[in-house]
Amino acid sequence: MATEGVEVPIPELQQLCKGALKGLGYDDQQAALITEVLLYAQLRDNSNNMVKVITGGLDKLTDEASPETQWQTSISAVINGHHSAGIVVMKEALQLAVAKARSHGCAVIGTNHTATGSGAIGYWAKQLAEQGLVGIVLSQSPEYVAPHGATEPIFGTNPFAIGVPSEQGSVVVDMATSATSWFGLVEADRAGRTVPDDLGYDADGDPTTDPAAIYKGGAIRVFDRSYKGSNIALMIELLAGPLVGGAVQDKLGSRNLGNLMIALDPSTMGDPPAILHNVDLMLGRVKGARRAAGVEEIMLPGERGNRLAEQRLAAGKIKVPSSLVHGLRDMAAGGAPKTAPQPSSTLPHPPITSIAPEAASISSTSPAVTSTLPGSLTPPTEGSPKTPQPPSNPSTSSSDITSISREPQASSSTSNSGSIPVVTSIAAGGGVGDGAPGMGVFSGRAEAKEHASGGRAQPSAASTSEAVPADITGEQQQQFEEEVQDVQQQEQQALQARQGISGGRHLATKLLHPPHSTQDPYEAVSPPLYQTATFGQPSATTNGPYDYTRSGNPTRTQLETQMADLEGADQAFAFASGMAALAAVLRLVGAGNGVVAGDDLYGGTSRLLAQVAPNLGIHVTNVDTTNIRAVEKALRAGHTKLLMLESPTNPRMQICDIATLTKMAHQVGALVVVDNSIMAPTFQHPLALGADISMTSATKFLNGHSDIMGGILSVKGPELAKKIYFTQNAEGAILSPFDCWLCLRGLKTMALRMETQAHNCAILAQALSQHPLISKINYPGLPGTPGFELNASQASSGGSLFSFETGK
């Protein structure tokens, strides 16, 4: 039985939609924004409309957190939605795109980990065009669409849109790459309608007119039912997926939909008035083209929908299915729609409905959004006074608020870093400021609260973060944001200089949230353990990313990726022990060539160089590496292939000038490896000082629990990395998956452990230096000790080891 339509006043429909969204856990601003985007579609008969609310398409996840700008340059950014609604995340992307395009001429903004779709994609292209920018927007959606010639859903409906400003306004070209939308099928099913038999297939791969058979296990066809539509869908899949960190399989189950937004200022391509005039000329040519028989008017893209929207707005009412009105009313009143089909995962596991929040989340306010049509976005300006003070003026709406939170510091007694203000939401007054190219600007996260009914999240409670007063002018708001950003960047840079880390986050935070190198469909916070020797392959003639654990294992890849990130390396390699790692480095030398090494070395290294190297035909010269002239004399062009350093040395804790010695070694064509086990990337970064390889024992500070053996080589340069990997794979001295997993666990607390250990070590060294039975303390963190100043110039701590001498 078909569902009858009812006419509803548009304001009433808006209020119903907002109420239903608030019942799902959205706050007032989020509900207003989402309603605005859905109404844009509803007025134009676009299927990305309010039916999404009552069919589960906008349900919140219990692990939702505030969107986070995880990477940013002057013209680009990637926003991790942390399972927020796609529309909310796209609003942040829009504000960043406008600000960057106005400041730098263009902007490329990607989003990932959005739990729901972006809404009518033409809405976002229109917003950009009405700001005088050319907008290009691409969007992923779950696997609903089969490639041409297939019956299995692989693509999303994958809409794309282009918005172009003109003298007469803006023109928007938007379309999906599928023959229909998922929610369009749901609407047809709820209304009791059949669909044409060329829209999709049922679960058996047969054409069907039953919309439910298509969206419940079947597949939609591409829009033109040919390879051309399939190719366009693939283009969007690639650009809005892998490029921005979106999922490439089981997008629904992983709740990781990607979007790509590009904004271009016409002034970067020529004279803007001339460009806009020529756009109008082009549109006029299309409208004035000779019409075919029976055609009364040639319509521009979006023109029919815009006219329909204008008519409905002028009338103040719209006809919608009665089931939509009843469903919205039920949800606004605290109930739920009677029949709300949910999209299902395409992989053989249940869709994710609840994921535990990540550790060390911090609370922040929800992203600030506006509920008005274009005209409220203002780009930031350059320059900032040194000390920001929140201005006040009783004339600005809440949509101009930018919330500021402070990242909690690690509970280390040695931490001397101040609180860093972190922009956690971007308001209409301007976007997050641009860092230098390659510098990531990070923001806080909010831990979502679970709804009392269990399946959804409630709006977050009042935030403890500081917020800018609402009663300020747009100009004052903009000035305040610039001042905050200037202080933020200064404090971040100072912190990085003290800690010796990159990426804009305190090391303790960075260790808790490492880069992910494996795709876990369940989004486990703790990386999964792949305790296996072999892996299945896609077919007899194609290989997957892993085949045999000696050659590679996802758990080892996760550890190696995190270590490369911490060390600033191109690649890292996990070995069965520190000595196995150094033995692999020794293989780089070759018979007949030489190694120059220190005369105060770890016992295992001394044994390797004294007893193994000669059997390989390698000549070893030991010198005092604290004596630059002695090292210079030992280095021989054409003969010395490796300089092996420790700083501090073990056991006398001597300090050598890593940067100077590295330059000298490179001048004679030698590589430099630094055993960084005592300092680890917590306190020292040899690669940043010029070394080619940093070796860190995972047995000690990396793991920190005395239950594994391991060694990590972090390498600069792809060619050198290839050589190390060849030796690792050929000789097989790899770190086992379980030991890799244990080390990943230990890394999470490395900063807290090492900072506290170093603090205690310094106190103990100072106390023992006054003991009458001790004649000498060897500790580079103790003022007055040889090497103290040099160590302070290349490391951020004296470490947590010292030795001493007794007697006279």
Image (cartoon, rainbow, N blue to C red):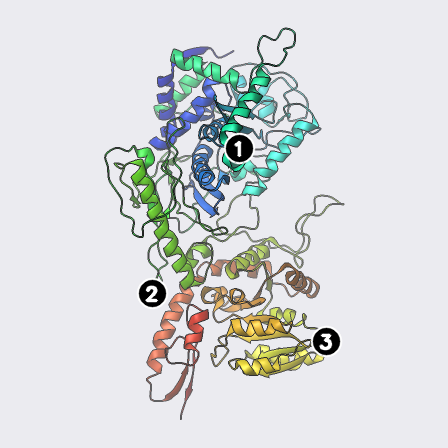
Q: Quadrant of the C terminus?
A: bottom left
- Kindly identify the residue that appears in the image at 56 percent across and 61 percent down: 739
Query: Where 623 falls versus 269 (above or below)?
Result: below
Name the secondary structure under disc 2: loop
- The answer to whether residue 320 is left or right of residue 589 is left
Residue 137: assigned label: 1
Query: Does residue 153 appear in this view?
Result: no
- Mark seen at residue 413: 2
State which quadrant residue 158 falls in: top right
Residue at 37 percent of width and 55 percent of height: 490
State which quadrant residue 539 falls in. top right
Mark 3 surroundings within 10 Å by alpha-carbon count, few (fewer than 14), some (14 through 19), many (20 or more): some
Disc 2 marks a residue whose amino acid type is Ser
For mark 3, what is the residue?
Answer: 591
Q: Which element is circle 1 on?
A: strand
Q: Residue at x 51, y 45 (%)?
A: 523
Locate residue 441, reporting x and y percent: 44, 49
